[in-house]
Image: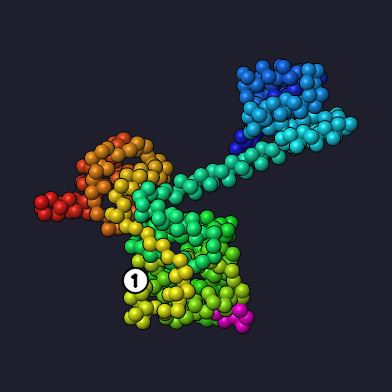
């Protein structure tokens, strides 16, 4: 049996004892556990004792038809898989089996290799479905949702704007999770199967920003030893997330505006433009209106990227959600560092909830990870936080002095 195989138990139903024994021996050598039944009544008793992952049943049996048992089993457990065995004269009945929920059918006289091929195909499909489900579950678990009214407003806006192609402007202080919100928008959009390309505009040099955004042709400038696609072409069909967009130079802002209006990019050194289909989501912790008034940000670009605005709250404004986020980060920390910290004592949660959190969710994550790493206890206590996180000791010392 291959690794990752989710199918183990097989029930073979056939009144031909020789065929049943042959299949039990042959499939057993392939790593499966096989039971035999010679009738539907016998099969019912077998399924009561051990639920099969797969039923391989003859179409014609002494006491009932394989199709009737197929329908009966599917009514009890829709996940059980069926492969029907039929004679060449029963092709029409085989089609009815498929319509009733069977995965496939094989013709008699039986070719064991053909049967094994169908079983392996079924396993591959089941493993693929399981992988997709796991991926969705992992993605869902990564998007922990706060319960406060402030966060619910954010999620409502995400659900509202995600299916559209509107450019989204995400405003929020450092560490509130703006990229997290941008990723949620992408994953809920019609572009979810296409790339999500995050770009830190604050880390981009003004000399190379045109090449980074729009790509370049080999030899177009010193150091351009190969062709480069650029962020827009990398994000083709998907979402380009521009974090801290206020840091872009006015020259790049002008080029960016043109691309957003024309939906074409021209790589540095190229003679032809390339059409692009990219959704823009931007974020900043800066007051861009003030930047516009001071001439540091183009007014026309500001309105182009601000088709829909989402304001992400500070963690200090959603204190009731702090225990929820803390437990989420605890679970992730346990996974990442192979630890088994089971939770927080009440005094630790009170400590976390009372703190001011200037670094917002990013700071909370860092604090939880640090404490999980150093603790030898099975639960986190406030003393551990105060002794190992200087910011907490300073905050509560200053707070007590005010009283």
Is residue 184 rendered to the left or right of residue 390? Answer: right
Colour scheme in the image? rainbow
From the top left corner, tell me how far across and down residue 17 is, in percent.
Answer: 79, 18
Name the quadrant of the N terminus.
Answer: top right
Q: Is residue 213 magenta?
A: no
Question: What residue do we see at 68% from left, 19% from top?
Answer: 44
44 relative to 378, above or below? above
Displayed quadrant of residue 293: bottom left
Question: What residue do we see at 68% from left, 32% from top?
Answer: 81
Question: What residue do we see at 35% from left, 76% from top?
Answer: 291
Q: Is residue 203 visible?
A: no
From the top left corner, tell me how far across and down residue 20 is, in percent.
Answer: 77, 21
Q: Nearer the viewer, residue 376 or 104?
A: 104
Instruction: Report the span colored magenta.
Output: 267-273
Q: Secondary structure at mark 1?
A: loop
From the top left corner, tell me how far across and down residue 207 is, in percent.
Answer: 44, 79
* Residue farthest right in this picture: 89
Q: How many marks?
A: 1
143 relative to 95, above or below? below
Is residue 304 rendered to the left or right of residue 48? Answer: left
Is residue 189 rendered to the left or right of residue 284? Answer: right
Q: Is residue 146 visible?
A: yes
214 relative to 85, above or below? below
* Mark 1 surroundings within 10 Å by alpha-carbon count, few (fewer than 14), some (14 through 19), many (20 or more): few
Q: Nearer the viewer, residue 387 or 291?
A: 291
Q: Which residue is mark 1?
A: 287
Q: Main secondary structure of the magenta part?
A: loop
Displayed quadrant of residue 131: top right
Question: What residue do we see at 37% from left, 73% from top?
Answer: 288
Is residue 28 rendered to the left or right of residue 248? Answer: right
């Amino acid at each position: 049996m291959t690794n990752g195989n989710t199918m183990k138990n097989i029930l073979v139903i056939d009144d031909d004892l020789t065929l049943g024994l042959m299949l039990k021996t042959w499939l057993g050598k392939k790593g499966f556990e096989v039971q035999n039944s010679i009738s539907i009544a016998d099969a019912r008793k077998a399924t009561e004792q051990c639920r099969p992952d797969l039923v391989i049943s003859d179409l014609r049996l002494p006491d009932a038809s394989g199709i009737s048992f197929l329908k009966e089993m599917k009514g009890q457990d829709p996940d059980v898989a069926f492969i029907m065995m039929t004679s060449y004269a029963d092709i029409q009945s085989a089609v009815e089996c498929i319509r009733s929920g069977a995965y496939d059918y094989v013709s008699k006289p039986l070719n064991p290799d053909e049967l094994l091929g169908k079983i392996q195909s079924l396993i591959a499909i089941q493993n693929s479905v399981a992988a997709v489900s796991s991926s969705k579950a992992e993605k869902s678990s990564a998007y922990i949702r706060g319960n406060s009214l402030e966060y619910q407003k954010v999620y409502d806006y995400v659900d509202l704007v995600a299916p559209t192609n509107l450019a989204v402007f995400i405003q929020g202080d450092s560490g509130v999770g703006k990229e997290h919100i941008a990723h949620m928008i992408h994953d809920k959009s019609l572009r979810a199967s296409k790339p999500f390309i995050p770009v830190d505009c604050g880390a981009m040099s003004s000399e190379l920003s045109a090449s980074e955004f729009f790509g370049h042709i080999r030899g177009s400038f010193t150091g351009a030893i190969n062709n480069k696609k650029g962020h827009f072409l990398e994000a083709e069909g998907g979402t380009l997330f521009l974090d801290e967009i206020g840091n872009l130079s006015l020259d790049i802002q002008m080029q960016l505006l043109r691309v957003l209006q024309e939906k074409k990019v021209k790589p540095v050194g190229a003679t032809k433009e390339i059409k692009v289909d990219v959704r823009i989501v931007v974020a900043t912790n800066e007051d861009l209106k003030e930047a516009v008034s001071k001439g540091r940000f183009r007014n026309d670009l500001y309105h182009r990227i601000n088709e829909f605005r989402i304001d992400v709250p500070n963690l200090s404004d959603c204190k009731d959600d702090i225990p929820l986020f803390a437990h989420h980060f605890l679970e992730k920390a346990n996974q990442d560092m192979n630890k088994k910290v089971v939770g927080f004592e009440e005094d630790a949660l009170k400590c976390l909830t009372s703190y001011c959190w200037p670094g917002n969710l990013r700071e909370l994550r860092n604090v939880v990870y640090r404490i999980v790493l150093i603790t030898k206890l099975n639960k986190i206590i406030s003393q551990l936080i105060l002794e190992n996180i200087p910011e907490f000791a300073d905050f509560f010392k200053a707070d007590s002095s005010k009283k």
